[in-house]
Structure formats: structure tokens, C-alpha cells
């Protein structure tokens, strides 16, 4: 583990909504919800902090958002405009380093260990970037600084909005111990609920479990959880990263033949895939089903659709069609997975959710 790296995670604050409030003074201080007409089938892309006070959040159906925040102002948004601003933000990043790994339009990792300005302090660089974004673009960003990507990302969310959190190698384990487990990057709702049932509510709780126990309970993810909570991560900032697919899979504790359980897994996967696709602003044309039987024989089947999709219901329907086509219901299933691939950027007007 290399603790000498200097990694910054920059996360724009309510990016799309903040752009709308910047460009339209009438929206400032108002609960802005990006996602279209609440009377139609749509999903919230993001919302302003004024709307978040009412419980509105991204990936929520717009109808539900309207019920929670009746005074909310719904805006369709302009993805091309947001992309242009995102490129202006990345141009600011490039003043310091070319080692930039975008996660989406509104967040990125930067490795500034060796940087163009030969600055020794990553904290000063992060602060300069925040100030440049604010003065040049009238937008705010939060930043996390540490020696690996996992900690930097958690740190950037620690004091939002417009926060700056620095976690040194000496402070890392103590910092991670206090973090609620649902704030750990990669721990979703289902995993968080399972952890809570096991008495794991914070990093300190997680740390009490052995590596073997975590692998037993959470399989491959358990291996990473054991290391992450100890501040150990060897992932490097990858400037060539381009997401080619989004998928989820699970290994059952007991072999499964029950079609209802398999279908429920596909529904959960489809919802998570939709959320991730919305986050990275992509949709896909190919859906892949993966089955692993009790004898470890693995079978994959794919279908390429006529149109690009990101909707969880359409993803589920494609996965169910594949399952019906290849699974007889006889052989016990050890693992099931669902992936959407053949991705391309999504146009904002296509961001819809059937509900």
C-alpha cells in the first residue's frame, strides 16, 4: 500500500440544479428538481439543496418528489449544456494534472502526487480548484484529499456543500471508524441492511469482523471491505477509464431453484443498474444474464435490443426473458448476475422511468 500518493476527489454540489440556479436568478434559493414534468413518468436526475430538505433525491420518481415537495420547481434540464460546463471544470483540473479519472459529469479523481505546478500540498491544490470553479463558473464543489481513492471519495462527502476534508495516512483508520456504513462507497441499500442486521452500523463495527467472516457474509465485496476500513486500497487513478458496462450479481448462501427468488434478484439488480446508469448518464442496448450452477458450470446469455434503455422495468423484462429462455428450473443455481452493456451517452430527454 502506497501512502505517499496524493489523491483529490472533486464532487460538484447539486451540479445540474446549481447550473440552473446560476443561469436563472429566479430559481435561486428555490427548491429546483431536475427531471421533467411530475405529471408524466419521469425520474429525478438531481435537485437543489432546498429540495433535499424535503427528502427529494436522485433516482426518485418525479411524482413522488412532487408529493414530498409540492412547491418544487421542475426543470427538464439541458444535458448538452451540463456537458459543456463539465468540460470547463475538467479544463481547470488539467492546469494541475493529466491524471484525471472522471466518474460522471460532476465528479472526478485527480492524482496530484506529481503536478504541473510542482505544488507539494494536495490540500492547497484542492482549495485552489474549488476557488477557481467558484470564481470562474460561479459554482461550488466539495473536495476530499487523501492517499487513496476510497478515502478521498468519502471525504468529499463529509462537509457538503463547498467542503474540504483532508485525511492523512495517520488519521485514516480513526476517520473510517466513525463513518456510517451506508456512507462507504460501494455499500448499497441491500448490503447496508444486511450489515445492520449483523450489528455493523459504522466503520468501527465493520472492523471487528475478521476477513474470513466478511468474505463468508459478503463474498468478493467482503475482501475489499476488510481492506477499505483499514485504509488499504491499491486502486490507481485511471485517466483512460470509460465505463463499458454496468452490472450486479449475487452468490446465494444456499443453492436456489425457486423462480420467484431468481426473479426478485433480477428486479433488485435492474433497479441498481438503472440508478448507476442515470449517474453516469449512459444507456445500453445489450442485456446479459449470467447463471452459475451448483457444480460451478457458468452460462451466459445476451440479448441486443432494438433501442437503447436505462429503465429498470425494461432491463428486468429483458433479464426475465433470458432467464425463461435458458433456465429449466431443474438445476440448482449458485449465482445469478445481470449486466447492461453496449453503452453510449444518454440524452436528457430520454431520462424516463415507467412507474
Image (cartoon, rainbow, N blue to C red):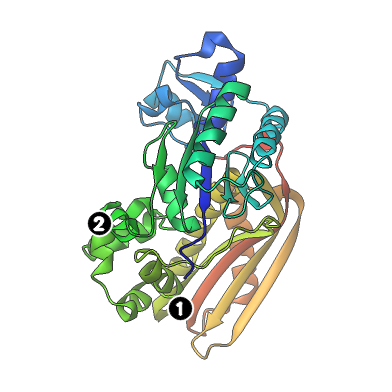
Q: 313 or 169: nearer the eye?
A: 169
Q: Which is more N-terminal, label 1 or label 2? A: 2
- Between circles 2 and 1, the one closer to the viewer is 2
- One can see residue 67 in this view: yes
Q: Is residue 196 above or below residue 107?
A: below
**Corner quadrant of residue 70:** top left
Disc assigned to residue 257: 1
Seen from the viewer's position, the closer of residues 318 and 56 is: 56
In the current view of this chain or complex, which residue is farthest to the left?
Answer: 199
Q: What residue is disc 2 on?
A: 201
Q: CA distance from mark 2 to mark 1?
A: 32 Å
Label 1 crowding class (10 Å Cα cut-off): few <14, some 14-19, many 20+? some
Q: Is 331 or 19 nearer to us in this picture?
A: 19
Residue 136 x/y as whole percent: 63, 23
Query: Does the image show residue 44?
Result: no
The picture places residue 100, in percent across and down from the top left corner, at: 64, 50
- In the image, taking residue 350 as reference, residue 139 lies left or right, namely left
Percent x, y of residue 135:
58, 22
Where disc 1 sits, the SS reads: loop
Position in image of residue 174 (x %, y %): 27, 57
| In the image, residue 308 above or below residue 252 | above
Q: Residue sitting at 39 percent across and 72 percent down?
A: 222
The residue positioned 46% from the left and 48% from the top of the image is 145
Amino acid at each position: 500500500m502506497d501512502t505517499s500518493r496524493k489523491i483529490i476527489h472533486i464532487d460538484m454540489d447539486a451540479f445540474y440544479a446549481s447550473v440552473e440556479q446560476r443561469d436563472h436568478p429566479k430559481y435561486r434559493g428555490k427548491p429546483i428538481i431536475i427531471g421533467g414534468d411530475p405529471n408524466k413518468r419521469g425520474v429525478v436526475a438531481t435537485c437543489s439543496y432546498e429540495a433535499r430538505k424535503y427528502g427529494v433525491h436522485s433516482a426518485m420518481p418525479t411524482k413522488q418528489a412532487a408529493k414530498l415537495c409540492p412547491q418544487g420547481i421542475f426543470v427538464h434540464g439541458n444535458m448538452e449544456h451540463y456537458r459543456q460546463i463539465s468540460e470547463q471544470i475538467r479544463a481547470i483540473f488539467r492546469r494541475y494534472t493529466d491524471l484525471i479519472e472522471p466518474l460522471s459529469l460532476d465528479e472526478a479523481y485527480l492524482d496530484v502526487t506529481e503536478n504541473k505546478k510542482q505544488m507539494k500540498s494536495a490540500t492547497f491544490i484542492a482549495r485552489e480548484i474549488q476557488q477557481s470553479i467558484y470564481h470562474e463558473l460561479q459554482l461550488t464543489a466539495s473536495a476530499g484529499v487523501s492517499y487513496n481513492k476510497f478515502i478521498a471519495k468519502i471525504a468529499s462527502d463529509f462537509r457538503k456543500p463547498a467542503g474540504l476534508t483532508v485525511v492523512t495516512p495517520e488519521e485514516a483508520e480513526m476517520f473510517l471508524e466513525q463513518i456510517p456504513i451506508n456512507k462507504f462507497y460501494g455499500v448499497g441499500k441491500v448490503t447496508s441492511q444486511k450489515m445492520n442486521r449483523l450489528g455493523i452500523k459504522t466503520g468501527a463495527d465493520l472492523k471487528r469482523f475478521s476477513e474470513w467472516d466478511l468474505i463468508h457474509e459478503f463474498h468478493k465485496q467482503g475482501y475489499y471491505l476488510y481492506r477499505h476500513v483499514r485504509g488499504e486500497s491499491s486502486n490507481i487513478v485511471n485517466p483512460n477509464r470509460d465505463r463499458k458496462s454496468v452490472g450486479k450479481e449475487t452468490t446465494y448462501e444456499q443453492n436456489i431453484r425457486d423462480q420467484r427468488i431468481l426473479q426478485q434478484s433480477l428486479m433488485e439488480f435492474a433497479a441498481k443498474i438503472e440508478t448507476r446508469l442515470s449517474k453516469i448518464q449512459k444507456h445500453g442496448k445489450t442485456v446479459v444474464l449470467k447463471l452459475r450452477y451448483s457444480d460451478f458450470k457458468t452460462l451466459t446469455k445476451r440479448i441486443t435490443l432494438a433501442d437503447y434503455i436505462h429503465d429498470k422495468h425494461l432491463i428486468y423484462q429483458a433479464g426475465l426473458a433470458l432467464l425463461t429462455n435458458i433456465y429449466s428450473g431443474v438445476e440448482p443455481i449458485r449465482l445469478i448476475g445481470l449486466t447492461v452493456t453496449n453503452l453510449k451517452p444518454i440524452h436528457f430527454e430520454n431520462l424516463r422511468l415507467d412507474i
